[in-house]
Amino acid sequence: MKFYNSFTRKKEEFVPIEANKIKMYVCGQTVYDYCHLGHARKSVVFDMIRRWFIASGYAVTYVENITDIDDKIINRAIENKEDINALTSRFINYMHGDFDKLGIMRPDLEPRATEFIPQMLKIIESLIEKGYAYRANNGDVYYVVRKFVGYGQLSGKTLDSLRAGERVEVDTNKLDPLDFVLWKASKPGEPFWESKFGNGRPGWHIECSAMSEELLGKNFDIHGGGQDLQFPHHENEIAQSEAHNECKFANYWMHNGFLNINDEKMSKSLGNFFTLRDVLAKYDAETIRFFMLRTHYRSPLNFTHDGLTDAKQGLTRLYTAIKPYTVNRSANINWNLEYANRFKQAMDDDFNTSLAISILFEIASQINKEQNRDLAELLVLLSDKIGLMDREVKDFFNSSSEISSELIEEQIKKRQLAKQNRDFATADKIRNDLLAMGIILEDKPTGTIWRNV
């Protein structure tokens, strides 16, 4: 098995620290609002990776943290006039509910930052003793970035290129603009914990160093997260942990690509910001997962309505192929079979779900030609290894009407426009595509109506 190591910027053969076991840490959510589509992509990606490790025979310990204390959380609680614990607990429950719908397995361990304050303080004390950290005049404790020789290796940035005011917040309390906060002195009305450096709360970066060390050890196999976390968050984690423990932090680093909306970065200011909950209200959850997995995890993913429509049609093709058959979902896969072997090769080569899914479509086409129940079973079993086709056929088709009436109406409008332009090929394609999704169109004198098959 080979995959891309963000630290070395090349594909490497995976060699675990302990044979047949994997210790894996992935940065999770800051829980003050609903999860957005970017969070969903990250979690679907690492769920797929985790599932394939398990399918490959590894015993995986999967840790994904929850940030339940930071400025955004405090500010939102003040806005809501709500207790912080009540706020974070509520959004943790929302996150679990939304992720469950996407077929994302719960982490083996899901630590919350506020549960690991003593471990964070231990690391901070160690860094101060070693000269890697200092207490500033305002009571905050900062990390001395320039003292850590390897700083910038993960992100490819040099210290000289990191000018104050660009990616680094300017703070006159720092000895150097690049230094980052480990401990924030408490302000009136804010939650705080007692420490040798005064009452306060942890900075963002220190929490992951503390939780990963406590739960997985000083050195573990894989650290993952979104590409946006590569700098400064993951860079700072490495600096903290390696200065503290004097050993390598994580052996492999993995980052999923960005998610764009209609070729633009998702942003509230652009008006193209979507929560996962918004999208789940309009689209079938498995369709969203399928849509995300069709693109390689390291590539940018462009989220569009047309893309989701196409994903639904593709997923319908797979379910339609197995519709006549009863399959044993607990059967073992014969990996020596050509399709299974090719699927495995695709997944073992940097988790190439794009190629793996194209092989699923090949199997579906062959099923339709041969009427082969064994191939139908293989299609289901392979799909399951990446978290797809976990529903019974009848349940899939019964859910078609719940996809989105809005989406169906959009397709009807496109069909009407195509007919007006005498583009009957496109009009027929839209009708047939909707039929494949279980939707029948009926042209009436007053317009087109639709109903379920």
Image (cartoon, rainbow, N blue to C red):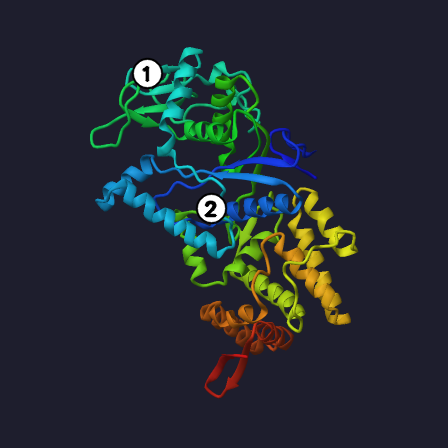
Task: Please tell me how many numbered marks the rendered image carries.
Answer: 2
* Res 275 seen here: no
Where does the N terminus fall, quadrant-wise? top right
Q: Is residue 303 above or below residue 418?
A: above
Name the kind of residue labelled 1 in the image: Ala
Q: Position of residue 225 (x, y in %)?
A: 52, 38
In the image, what residue type sits under mark 2? His
| Residue lying farthest to the bottom in this orientation | 445
Q: Which mark is residue 302?
A: none
Q: Is residue 176 left or right of residue 452?
A: left
Q: Secondary structure at mark 1?
A: loop
Residue at 50% across, 81% down? 448
Task: Say whether residue 219 is left or right of residue 77.
Answer: right
Determine the residue positioned at 39% across, 48% down. 268
Task: Give the residue at x 71% y 52%.
Answer: 343
Residue 213 seen anywhere in this rendered image of the structure: yes
Please provide percent x and percent y for residue 11.
68, 35
Report, in whole angstroms, how far the alpha carbon at label 1 lies from the one at label 2: 34 Å
Q: Position of residue 153 (x, y in %)?
A: 57, 24
Q: Within 10 Å of the Cα at label 1, are there few (<14), some (14-19), or many (20+) other Cα atoms?
A: some
Quadrant hosting residue 182: top left
Q: Is residue 344 above or below residue 236?
A: below
Left or right: residue 191 versus residue 436 is left
Residue 340 rendering spot, x and y as whole percentages: 74, 54
Task: Name the quadrant of the C terminus.
Answer: bottom right
Query: Please, what secondary structure does the residue beneath circle 2 have?
Result: helix
Q: Earlier in the sequence, mark 1 or mark 2?
A: 2
**Residue under pointer 1:** 136
Q: Residue at x 26, y 26 (%)?
A: 186
Do the CB atoms of the residues marked 1 and 2 lie less than 8 Å apart? no
Q: Name the residue beneath numbered marker 2.
A: 39
Label 2 CA crowd tier, 10 Å (few <14, some 14–19, many 20+): some
